[in-house]
Amino acid sequence: MTGYIVKRLISAVPVLLGISVIVFLIMAMIPGDPATAILGSYATPENVEKLNRDLGLDKPLVQRYFIWLGNMLQGDFGRSFSLNRAVLDEVLERFNATLLLAGTSFVICSILGVAAGVVSAARQYGLADKAITFAVLLGISIPSFFLGMMMILIFAVNLRWFPVSGMWPIYGARDLSALISHLTLPAIALAVVATGVIARLSRSAMLEVLRQDFIRTARAKGVHERSVIWRHGLRAAMVSIIPVLGIQAGFVLSGAVYIEMVFQWPGVGRMLVDAILKRDILLVQGGVVFVAACYVLFNIAVDVAQSLLDPRIKA
Amino acid sequence: MSFLRLLSRNRLALAGLIVMSVVVLLALLTPILPLPDPDVTNTAERFKKPFSERALLGTDHLGRDLASRLMWGTRLSLAVGFAAAVAAATIGAAIGVIAGFYGGRVDNVIMRGVDMLMGFPYILLALAIVAALGPGLLNALIAVAAVNIPFFARNIRGVTVGIAHKEFVDAARLCGMSNARIIITEVVPNVVPVIVIAMSTTIGWMILETAGLSFLGLGSQPPQADLGSMLGEARSALITNPHTSVVPGAMILVIVMAINLLGDGVRDALDPRLKSGALSRPMPTTMVRRTDPVPQPEGDGILSLRNLQTQFHVKDRIYKAVGGVDLSVRPGECLGIIGESGSGKSVTALSIMGLVASPPGVITGGAVHYKGEDLIGAPYETLRHLRGDRVAYIFQDPLATLHPLYTVGAQLIEAIQSHHRTSTSEARARAIELLKSVRIPNAEARVDNYPHEMSGGMRQRVGIAMALANDPEVIIADEPTTALDVTVQAQILALLDDLRRERGLAIIFITHDFGVVAQLCDRVAVMYAGRIVEEGPTDAILNAPAHPYTARLMACVPELGQGRRQLAAIPGLPPVVDKLPAGCAFADRCPKAASACRSGDIDLGPFGPARKIRCIDPEIPVQEATA
Amino acid sequence: MSAALKLTDLSKTFPVGKRLFGAPKAGVKAVQPLSLTVEQGETLGIVGESGCGKSTLARMLVGLLPPTTGQIEIDGAPLDNADPATFGQKIQYVFQDPISSLNPRKTIRQIMDAPLRHLHGMDAKARTARIAEIFAAVNLREEFLDRYPHEFSGGQAQRIGIARALAADARILILDEPVSALDVSVQAQVLNLLADLKQKFGLTYIFISHDLAVVEAVSDRVAVLYFGSVVEVGPADQVFAAPRHPYTRLLADSAPVVGRALAAPEAKETELPDPLNPPEGCAFRARCPRATEVCAGAVPSLEVQSDSVSAACFHPLADTD
């Protein structure tokens, strides 16, 4: 097992390098130079040239990439000019908030989605199946930012059950209950779409599995139907559900950008959007690379989970 | 066209189609509709409520007419979402087809690149692209299309790999076609439905994503607005004037929902498996709908079938797979059922314990008596207690019939514990014992193997061990050696024969091979088109077949040791069981058929002391029946 | 009679554990170097169980798979590394699964057109005439031409597959399990058709199957494959009637025959060796009742035993065994 994890970690190195190249190249495509963006359009040519030299922008592209990569590996992601702060510090702080939001949502959507999918498949064409199918359809059709706004309107403004926005109360204690009450609405709004997708795919994966010959064998053995569904069916279906969960984690992380905007959640998504609008390239670059790297590591964890579940994957 | 007919049959998809048609029509007509200019601001008229004078849906924070902005915004959102979907599908499909068709290094390099792009949460890539190109609707479109290319590429590649390994692609090569021509004429036409499905199910998603980027202020720039930027602008007035948010948000919801409904309908209409109803989940027991009175038990058989009828109801067609079968097996006896594919022999076997997949299978008549108790229509719990305990099955393909993710030990233990309260360690010891009894070498180690770690012969031994787990009285073996090589088949048949003699098992053995029947079975029933045409002691029937079908079928089979020769063939094909002729089903292929053969039902009548036959003109005189 | 097809040291090794760049980690020898000759107008049967390399051999013969070593000669001319199109005019293939060998999205006419157009460059009129001729030969009605493959039964589809192979006008047909997907009553129809066609057009067949009785019924000579090697080759009526190689004997004894009592022909419950880890010496020795130390030391080569029967065995069976 350890061997498999080490092997997967090693195989992630080229992926991480590839990601850094892609990000670097996209950022290198930016028309106009960052120096002008930093100094404003009234900067003198001498100042622009000096800053370009300071930033190493006068060097060839390949050399610049390796300098940037080398710095990054030493933990130096550069400095954000708009925040006047080290990029890594800012990203780390923001990423904690995003992780809390996205992680909570991911747990909600995985459990609810898979459960709904299994129930829906087990009761195919029954009332529960129809209700779930309709709810799922609604869930995957509603824009998460619109859903978030409507939830604020109903549950925060009208019913006053939850705070309108933010992660902490402006005044008052920063305790767990405050955090939970702030987290509830955005986490649910974020989970809805992914729950729908996961439920849908779990349902079809289950239907696919339940038609297999080994299910008939289980029934011929006299295994109880509950066990046929949950033990034989779900176990086999999980093999195709787990990769979907891995992909959905990426969607939850992506959706967090919108939800952070709607709920004023101090996460990395909002930071990125602000940075783009301010053309704070180093902050965008650093944020994207950092989050993408975390996602790659998460996917390795998914693969490991998959290999634990499926003995046919050679460790 | 059948596609449109299928689509229209799906009521939800039809609703989606109608809504989408209305929306698209309105979007197309927007420029000529008498709407106020969507971009003219009039701060005096700001935040007018819906249904107010001169503003059907009210006005926004700059006093612009919401109805007009909604129409123009819808137009823009639809166009951008559709364009992004087409671009992503075309480029992604092209990449996927090339990677999947050529395989090898080309595939490896392309797919590593795709994996790398999928290594990003999609929005990071989109944000990076927008950051590089600058905010704007066209750039948002490019970003959304670009991040979706890998999804299409991966999806289409998978399908293409499957098609590129099909035999018709090899055949095209042998016909002298070039790779480019094979891709265009052989591969692409088979991939197109998948592309259409993928596109129709993701186009709603693309609209959501472009709206999202606009919502963040990275898409369409003021004063031009799509639905997403309308929502974005309305956000600051969410609490005071919610209608400015609700109007565009509800529109996105309606559009995306209609597209998703339509997309699902397109998918269902194009997916051949859904057409045949094959994607429905089989129920725990076969459906029973008996109208005629249930036959009473008779005879001394431990298991006897009386006038069993099983049908498949697919759409408006009824396939009479089993059309009234009478059979009986005594303890210690081996009964063979022989027939060609489609003769109903497997369905007969599965009907006994209610294991015919349902839907579409329905048992419509007859009875199955186990020790005098009717199993057809018995409550689920009764059947469950008998399944695997008193009546056990062995199936054909042991790789597909064993659960791939549990060790064979775990599956054996489960078989035991489903019927007996025993500790897991006891059950495990019993499992090892069972593996030994089916002559699996090194059973103590093999018990922890997964099915994929065993050879076909070993897996089928596990299948047999599982059937023996609870010392059943009857074993129903459904072509248990068909998937095996001949040397392994010989081993398995010898094993089954020994086991039945040791344990006094009753076996119902389904096969298409006369040689196997001859070696293993005491009695044999020959099935054709869902019915038994001849039944009796194996030796008597094989030495002197009385039904013309049996005689001719045996003549078709070459037998080892007779050298090179011309084979007898039966002209024509077996009838399709949804359109059975009146009278004898074999009449159309029978050289002796007379008008009496086609006029009415022919009974399975006695033929000599021990045999039965469904024929009015047997091949041999009845005196020779015992030969 | 001259040799229609001559194989010299033909072998195939599949790489295992592929890497993106560089050599693979290991190889599986699907077909060991083998040499065979097929005479003009002859039917050579090839029998073997799953994993014996018979399909790999067939795919090499028609150029769908490049051989690792050795060469193929047709009518005395070598055919090395040529593209399938050149192969296609000389040697054609009939597939095991008749339905999946026909593109579901093409009409039968389009399928029949392909070899005529791409191999022989015929115009539309010539094609129509030729298709009519071929369809008459395989007893198919011309009204089938505008239908799609899913409308046909397995037996009809296999006739269409045979018609397509005939359209290429090749003299040699590789029949890869052509009837094993068909029911026995239909199987006999197709086998008889193949025999007629062979006579009518003077064809040469290589008939690959796992079914001994079928192979015996249609072949002039039979080669028995085990673990990628030919272990015995000889006239069809002798190979199974009086096997020389113990494996051939095992095969013949395993085939269920009406009127023969059931007995496991093998005392040991053994199966095929692991191709990733092939045994030293004779691949059959672990299952062989006659195996001795010699068998572990060297691989036996194919040698003439008697009456034009050759077997690769150190201890071949005699008539009296």
Image (cartoon, rainbow, N blue to C red):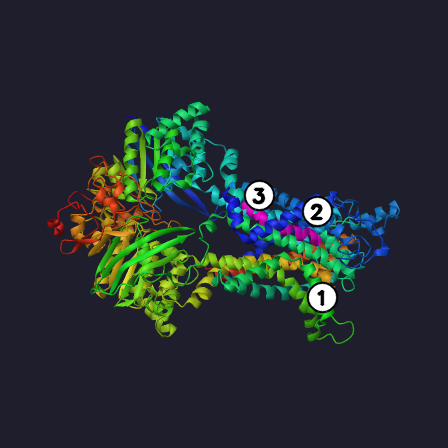
Residue A252 placement, left or right of B292: right
Query: Which subunit holds the residue at mark 1?
Result: A
Residue in front for this viewpoint, B250 or B188: B250
Quadrant including the N terminus of chain C: top left
Residue A212: image location, x then y, percent: 42, 57
Q: Are marks 1 and 2 on the same chain?
A: no
Mark sitting on residue B75: 2
- The span shown in magenta is B194-213
Q: Secondary structure at mark 2?
A: helix
Query: Of the residues under marks 3 and 2, which one precedes in the sequence?
Result: 2
Give amino acid for label 3. Ala
Residue at 48% in and 61% down: A124
Residue A100: image location, x then y, percent: 66, 66
- Location of mark 1 (residue): A152
Judge whether residue C243 is colored magenta: no
Give amino acid for label 2. Arg
Q: Hey, which quadrant is residue A104 in on the image? A: bottom right
Residue in front for this viewpoint, B164 or C267: B164
Residue at 49% in and 47% down: C18
Q: Secondary structure at mark 1?
A: helix
- Location of mark 3 (residue): B93
* Closer to viewer: mark 3 or mark 2: 2
| Farthest-out residue, left | B623
Judge whether residue B205 is colored magenta: yes
Q: Are marks 1 and 2 in contact (CB under 8 Å)?
A: no
Q: Are marks 3 and 1 on the same chain?
A: no
Give amino acid for label 1. Ile
Q: Is residue A151 visible?
A: yes
